[in-house]
Image (cartoon, rainbow, N blue to C red):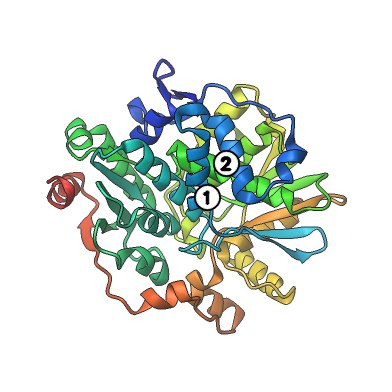
């Protein structure tokens, strides 16, 4: 698989290089030099999840990882289901929260960990990533205990749910967590600045596990195929994706290019509405990040958007395939209550996607919205909005009473750099 840097198009790398490097020069994202179209979609959809996923990923990645070995990695990574739950007539939720950290990030995080462990072959690596909520837990659990790999996770102090935080700040070992006094975009900028610092990048053997890493993105393609495989009626399908950093939507649009029968997408955001405004006006004008109930989407400068632009500019997809909507706090709560009245308990991110889907779904269309996290990860919010108790699944109950092990730092790069060398620069 050949990829190129969207900012420095002369930089060409293999899949292995892209996974280990994370970002290209000038903070550019890697993008496939060629995306195929599969002519056997029905046959693929008839396969079980792991078998189908390993076939899709083999066709994309090629022989850099032998096919039989790739199948083992995929089986290790995707060892949990992604069921499609019918919420009302012709409207379904793709439940992506049945993995070990109860969030969709388990798919990408676990596959990336398997790939990196396979491709690094004993090299020392430091994973440096920022999280607005679920990435931290998925990455921490995916890499926990792996030899020669250290993980450092930055997150905005006080701006993610306590249970989200406990899932990744209580592990210790090779997992290091730092609470930054700022918002997610500032955490993300600290990560980018570190990667731009040659001394830090080489001295710490840096890699990123954000959705900017191509291995995570390719893994996410697979659950869109799993969603369609579970549908009886696959015509006129619209998929609504709760969107923060826009990696999830990018993967869905890649799946469409490969031939998956999706008629259209809805990019569903909260009050951090850079993309909906851009699609209306043609002007890219990020505003300061706003804190919302759907905190994992509190991102005003989504890093994956250049890949979506590339899909349009290179003629893979028409811009008309994408609609977008911003759901405010009041309507997020309204959507949660509407879902509860339908007998389906959900959390704010999926509720945003549901509300946006309902606004855009036309007669004769089938809609899927993505359930990206278990409601219990947002227990306080769900209980307050719905007025009913939410029980904790075992994964959350086990870590809820543990002590967090995080450091707290100001939004200051030099302070972060010194801390990183102290933690993992040995």
Up the image or down, 23 lies above or below 106; here it is above
Q: Residue at x 66, y 32 (%)?
A: 258
Compared with 104, 317 (above or below) is above
Q: Do residues under tags 1 and 2 come within 8 Å of each other at their CB atoms? A: yes
Q: Secondary structure at mark 1?
A: helix
Identify the residue at horizontal 62%, vertical 27% (top origin): 312
Residue 403 appears anywhere in the view: yes
User: Which quadrant would residue 174 be assigned to in this image?
Assistant: bottom left
- Look at mark 2 in the image and give the residue it sits on: 54
Q: Earlier in the sequence, mark 1 or mark 2?
A: 2
Residue at the extreme front:
68
Q: Please indicate whether residue 227 sits to the left or right of residue 414 in the image.
A: right
Q: Quadrant of residue 4?
A: top left
Residue identified by numbered label 1: 75
Residue in front for this viewpoint, 40 or 86: 40
The reply, left or right, for residue 4 in relation to residue 407 is right
Mark 2 crowdedness (10 Å alpha carbons): few <14, some 14-19, many ≥20: many
Which residue is depicted at the point 50% across and 76% down? 393
x then y, percent, for residue 326: 61, 52
Q: Is residue 246 visible?
A: no
Mark 1 neighbour density, 10 Å: few (under 14) some (14–19) many (20 or more)? some
In the orientation shown, which residue stands out farthest toward the right?
A: 364
Side (left or right) of 204 relative to 5: left
- CA distance for labels 1 and 2: 8 Å
Q: Position of residue 332 (x, y in %)?
A: 61, 65
Where residue 197 sits in the image (x, y, percent)?
22, 33
Residue 146 percent across, percent down from the top left: 31, 52
Helix or strand or loop: what does disc 2 sit on?
helix
Number of numbered tags placed on the structure image = 2
Q: Nearer the viewer, residue 167 or 39?
A: 39
């Amino acid at each position: 698989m050949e990829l190129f840097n969207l900012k420095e198009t002369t930089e060409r790398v293999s899949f292995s290089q892209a996974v280990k490097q994370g970002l290209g020069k000038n903070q550019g994202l890697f993008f496939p030099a060629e995306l195929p179209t599969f002519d056997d979609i029905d046959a693929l959809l008839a396969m079980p999840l792991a078998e189908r996923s390993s076939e899709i990923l083999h066709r994309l990645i090629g022989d850099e990882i032998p096919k039989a070995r790739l199948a083992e990695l995929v089986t290790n990574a995707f060892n949990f289901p992604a069921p499609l739950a019918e919420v009302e007539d012709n409207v379904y939720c793709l439940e992506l929260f049945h993995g070990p950290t109860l969030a969709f990030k388990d798919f990408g995080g676990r596959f990336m960990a398997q790939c990196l462990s396979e491709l690094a072959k004993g090299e020392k690596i430091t994973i440096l990533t920022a999280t607005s909520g679920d990435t931290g837990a998925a990455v921490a659990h995916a890499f926990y205990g792996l030899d020669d790999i250290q993980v450092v996770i930055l997150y905005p102090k006080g701006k993610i749910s306590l249970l989200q935080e406990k899932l990744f700040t209580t592990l210790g070992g090779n997992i290091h967590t730092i609470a930054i006094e700022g918002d997610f975009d500032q955490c993300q900028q600290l990560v980018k600045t570190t990667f731009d610092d040659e001394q830090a990048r080489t001295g710490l053997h840096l890699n990123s596990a954000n959705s900017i890493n191509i291995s995570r993105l390719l893994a996410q393609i697979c659950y869109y195929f799993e969603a369609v495989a579970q549908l009886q009626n696959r015509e006129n399908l619209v998929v609504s994706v709760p969107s923060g950093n826009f990696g999830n939507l990018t993967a869905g649009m890649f799946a469409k290019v490969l031939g998956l029968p999706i008629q259209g997408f809805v990019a569903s955001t909260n009050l951090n509405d850079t993309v909906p405004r851009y699609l209306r006006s043609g002007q890219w004008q990020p505003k300061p990040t706003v804190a919302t109930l759907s905190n994992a989407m509190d991102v005003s400068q989504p890093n994956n958007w250049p890949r979506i632009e590339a899909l349009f500019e290179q003629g893979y997809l028409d811009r008309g395939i994408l609609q977008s909507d911003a759901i405010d706090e009041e309507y997020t709560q309204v959507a949660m209550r509407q879902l509860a009245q339908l007998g389906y308990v959900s959390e704010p991110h999926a509720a945003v996607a549901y509300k946006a889907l309902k606004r855009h779904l036309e007669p004769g269309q089938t809609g899927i919205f993505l359930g990206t996290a278990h409601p219990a990860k947002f227990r306080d919010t769900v209980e307050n909005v719905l007025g009913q108790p939410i029980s904790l699944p075992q994964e959350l109950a086990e870590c809820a009473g543990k002590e967090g092990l995080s450091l707290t730092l100001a939004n200051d790069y030099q302070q972060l750099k010194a801390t990183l060398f102290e933690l993992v620069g040995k």
